[in-house]
Image: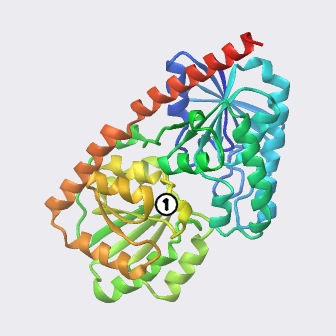
C-alpha cells in the first residue's frame, strides 16, 4: 500500500514519537511510505542549520523518503504567529495532496495540529487520524495569548475532520471517551498507546551517580508542564534538603521565565542543561537516581498521557510524578512511581524527599518494575502490530466502499 504520512513535525526535531523507526516498521510490513512534513523549526521557532525554506525539498533519513514543504516557522505564545505556523503548513500540505493524491492509497495523519487532518479531509484522500492532543482543549489549557478566540473555530474544524476520517487512533482510554462524547462513533476509534525509543534505551545501562541525589527532568519546558511548581518545590528543598539536586533537560516557551525565577530565588540545587541529543538525554535518564514528571492541574491532563511517561518507564528508573488521571493510574499499576498532587509544590517536595530517602535497592526494584510494565503493555512491537492491523483493515474497508458504489 502507498501511504502518505502527514505530520507537521518530524526528525531531526526532538520528541518525535512516531518518527523514522515508525516509518521503517510500516515499510517492513510491506507498505511504501512517504513522509510529508515541514522544514524543521521546533522548538526554537527557527529553521534548523542546513535547511532553508523552499517550495519543496526531498531527502532520505535512514532510508525513509521525506518530503519537506514550506511553512511559517514559529513556536511561541503568540496566537497570531502560531496560527500562521499551522495554517502555512496546512496550505502547503493541501496543495501537495491535491496535486499528488493519485500517488497514495491512504494517508496517516499525526495530530496535532488539527490543520494537518483538515488538509487530508479537503484533499478527499482516505485517512487515519492519530490524535495525540485533544483540540481545542489543549490550546485553551496551555494559556496561549488569544486562545479563547480560537476555541470555537478549532472545535468546528475538529468535528469536520473527525467526521471525514476513515479511522481514528486515540493515545489513551480517556481520550477515546472524550471523542465519543463529541459524537465520534466508538467503532471508528482505536486506542493505541505510545511507546518509547527502545533502541536508545537498549544501549544504556544504569550507572550510579555519586552524591548528591539527582532528579532528572527531560522534555518540554512549556505551559502544560507548569514547572514553576517545581521551582517552588526546589526552594523548599534548598532550605530543608541541600543533598538533593535537580537537572532540567529541554527547552520551551517557559524556559526563560523558569530560569529567571530560579535565579531570583538564588537556587543552587537546580540546573538548566538545555536541549541535548536523544542519545545524551537517554544516558542522563540511565544515570539518574530518579526521573521527574509534572503536568498542570487541568481536567484535560486527566486523559492525556505525555510521551515521556513511556520513555521514563522504558528507562528502568524510578519516577516522581505530579500528575492526575490516567497517567497517575498507569504509574500506580507499574509500581515505578511516587505520586504527588500536581500544582502543589509542598506535595512535590515531600515526594522528592520520600524518593531520596528510599534505599538504593527499593529504587532499583521500582525501576525494574516500570521497565517490565512497559515491556508487557506499551512496547513498540505491540504498538506497531496494532497500527499495521488498523491500516490494513481501514484500507480494505475503503476499498470495499469504493467497489460498492
Counting the numbered discs, the total is 1
Q: Quadrant of the C terminus?
A: top right
Q: Which residue corresponds to the image point at 28% horizontal and 56% vertical from the top-left? A: 336
Residue 346 in picture, x, y percent from top left: 38, 82
- Name the residue: 61% across, 23% down: 394
Please give the name of the residue rendered at 40% of the width and 72% of the height, measured from the top-left corner: 341
Q: Identify the residue position indicated by label 1 in the image.
A: 302
Q: Is residue 203 visible?
A: no
For this orientation, the residue located farthest to the top is: 403
Please determine whether, in this image, residue 112 is positioned above or below residue 284: above
Name the quarter where the N terminus is drawn: top right
Q: Is residue 372 left or right of residue 220?
A: left
State the residue in front, 202 or 141: 141
Is residue 389 in sight in this rendering? Answer: yes
Residue 135 picture quarter: bottom right
- Image coords of residue 148 (percent x, y): 75, 68
SS assignment at label 1: helix
- Residue 307 horizontal side relative to residue 57, left or right: left
- The x and y percentages for residue 191 are 50, 39
Image height check: is 74 above or below 177?
below
Amino acid at each position: 500500500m502507498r501511504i502518505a504520512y502527514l505530520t507537521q513535525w518530524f526528525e531531526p526535531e526532538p520528541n518525535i514519537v512516531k518518527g523514522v523507526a515508525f516509518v521503517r516498521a510500516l515499510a517492513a510490513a510491506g507498505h511504501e511510505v512517504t513522509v510529508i512534513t515541514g522544514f524543521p523549526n521546533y522548538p526554537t521557532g527557527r529553521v534548523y542549520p542546513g535547511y532553508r525554506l523552499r517550495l519543496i525539498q526531498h531527502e532520505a533519513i535512514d532510508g525513509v523518503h521525506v518530503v519537506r514543504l514550506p511553512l511559517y516557522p514559529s513556536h511561541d505564545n503568540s496566537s497570531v504567529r502560531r496560527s500562521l505556523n499551522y495554517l502555512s503548513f496546512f496550505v502547503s500540505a493541501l496543495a501537495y495532496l491535491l496535486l499528488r493524491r493519485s500517488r497514495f492509497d491512504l494517508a496517516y495523519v499525526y495530530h496535532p495540529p488539527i490543520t494537518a487532518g483538515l488538509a487530508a479531509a479537503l484533499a478527499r484522500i482516505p485517512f487515519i487520524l492519530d490524535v495525540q492532543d485533544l483540540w481545542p482543549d489543549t490550546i485553551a489549557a496551555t494559556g496561549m495569548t488569544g486562545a479563547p478566540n480560537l476555541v470555537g473555530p478549532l472545535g468546528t474544524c475538529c468535528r469536520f475532520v473527525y467526521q471525514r476520517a476513515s479511522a481514528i487512533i486515540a493515545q489513551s482510554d480517556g481520550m477515546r471517551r472524550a471523542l465519543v462524547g463529541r459524537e465520534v462513533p466508538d467503532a471508528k476509534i482505536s486506542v493505541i498507546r505510545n511507546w518509547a525509543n527502545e533502541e536508545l534505551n537498549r544501549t544504556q545501562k544504569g550507572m550510579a551517580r555519586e552524591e548528591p541525589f539527582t532528579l532528572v527532568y527531560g522534555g518540554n519546558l512549556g505551559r502544560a508542564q507548569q514547572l514553576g511548581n517545581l521551582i517552588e518545590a526546589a526552594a523548599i528543598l534548598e532550605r530543608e534538603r541541600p543533598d538533593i539536586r535537580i537537572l532540567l533537560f529541554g527547552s520551551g516557551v517557559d524556559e526563560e521565565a523558569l530560569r529567571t525565577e530560579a535565579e531570583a530565588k538564588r537556587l543552587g540545587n537546580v540546573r538548566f542543561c538545555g536541549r541535548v541529543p536523544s542519545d545524551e538525554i537517554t544516558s542522563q535518564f540511565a544515570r539518574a537516581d530518579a526521573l521527574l514528571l509534572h503536568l498542570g492541574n487541568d481536567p484535560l491532563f486527566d486523559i492525556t498521557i505525555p510521551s515521556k511517561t513511556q520513555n521514563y518507564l522504558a528507562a528502568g528508573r524510578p519516577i516522581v510524578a505530579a500528575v492526575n488521571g490516567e497517567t497517575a493510574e498507569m504509574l500506580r499499576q507499574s509500581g515505578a512511581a511516587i505520586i504527588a498532587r500536581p500544582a502543589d509544590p509542598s506535595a512535590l517536595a515531600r515526594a522528592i524527599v520520600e524518593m531520596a530517602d528510599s534505599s538504593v535497592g527499593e529504587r532499583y526494584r521500582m525501576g525494574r518494575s516500570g521497565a517490565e510494565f512497559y515491556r508487557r503493555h506499551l512496547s513498540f512491537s505491540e504498538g506497531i502490530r496494532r497500527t499495521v492491523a488498523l491500516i490494513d483493515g481501514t484500507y480494505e474497508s475503503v476499498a470495499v466502499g469504493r467497489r460498492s458504489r
